Every structure is written in C-alpha cells, then in structure tokens.
Amino acid sequence: MEIPSQLYTTYHEFASDMILLNFGQSCRLIYPDKLTPCPNCYQDSSTNRSTNIYKPGGPQSFTIGFCGWCNGDGFLKTEKSDTIRLRIYHDKKYFTKLPIDIQLQDGDVQVFGFMTDLPKLQMAVSIMLHTDAEGYTRQKYVLYGQPQPHGLGPTRRYFIAYLRFI
C-alpha cells in the first residue's frame, strides 16, 4: 500500500504550525563565549593573561593595578546566542517514546524542533527555555542524550531531544 504524497504534505504543514504558530516557544541557545584580545592592555603570550601594562591608544588608561577594561583577564568575553522555536513537553506522560535507553530525572523535558535547527542545538552549551518569560523565571537546560529524527515518510524534517535542567 502506498501512502499518498498529500498526506505527507498535510502532516508537515500541521507539524510546522505546531512549532511555529500554536505550541512552539522561543528558546535561546547559548554558545561558548567568543574571546577577543583586550584592546586596552598587552597580553602575556605564555599565559594568555593580561600583563596589566596599558596599551597606548586603549580606551581606558591606567598606570598601576590591573586593566579595568578586561579586569586583568587579557581578553573580553562576548556571549553568542541564537533563538529557535521548540515545542516543549514538561510532563513525562506526554513524551514520545524513543528507541534509546535513557534515564530521565524530574525536571527533564522533551522538545520537538526543526531538523535544520538541530546543529545549532548541538553546538549550544546551554538552552534557555521560554525566553519570553526570561525576566521572570530561569529555565536553563543542556542537551541530554542523542537527539532522534522524527517525522512522517522518508524525509525526517523534525527531531526529538531531551533536555536536562541545570
């Protein structure tokens, strides 16, 4: 029996709408900090720390103590992040059963997302769920286990993953 291609199209439209329009939540992916050399002081090449010697032309001059621009680190940290939409399930009774052996804890969640967003999720060091409520609550998670492809038909356009609360 062959499944009509229209069924696949209808399923993909429905699943996409469930993430984008109806039940999807904005989630912020936090990537490893980007380190850039401090423009205000010289760095020690053996330790990669500040020598705490002012670099002429730097934005904040100093003569004694440590560099106030980088706090003596020798580099500046810039947080990199991105936002994607995920369908989030907090209650285990609504989790889709996956063919993997994984030990879940209270507080773990299951998320559904677009396969095109999976590489971004895998590169993230942490995930902030419900970024619309970030000022009110802190829901910080990490990827737990191996995400699984999900979808109808030969083209799996979605993934399912578990996230662990940290």
Image (cartoon, helix red, strand yellow):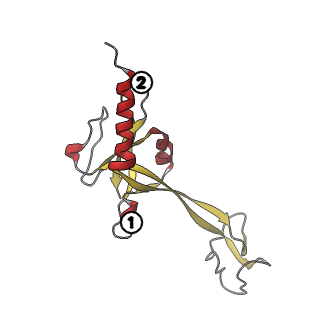
Expressed as whole percent of the image width and height from the top left, the position of residue 95 reads 25, 42
- Give x and y (percent) for residue 122: 47, 45
Task: Identify the residue at image location x=43%, y=34%.
Answer: 157
68 on left or right of 112: right
Q: Residue at x 34, y 19 (%)?
A: 3
Tell me, for residue 48, which label it has, or none. none
Residue at image coords 63%, 74%: 70
- The C terminus sits in image quarter: bottom left
Q: Pointers 2 and 1 in contact (CB under 8 A)?
A: no
Within 10 Å of the Cα at label 2, are there few (<14), some (14-19), or many (20+) other Cα atoms? Answer: few
Residue named by callout 2? 154
Q: Secondary structure at mark 2?
A: loop
Residue under numbered circle 1: 134
Q: What amino acid type should be assigned to the residue bearing mark 1?
A: Glu
Question: Along the horizontal axis of the image, is 50 left or right of 133?
Answer: right
Query: From what the image shows, is residue 53 above or below residue 87?
Result: below
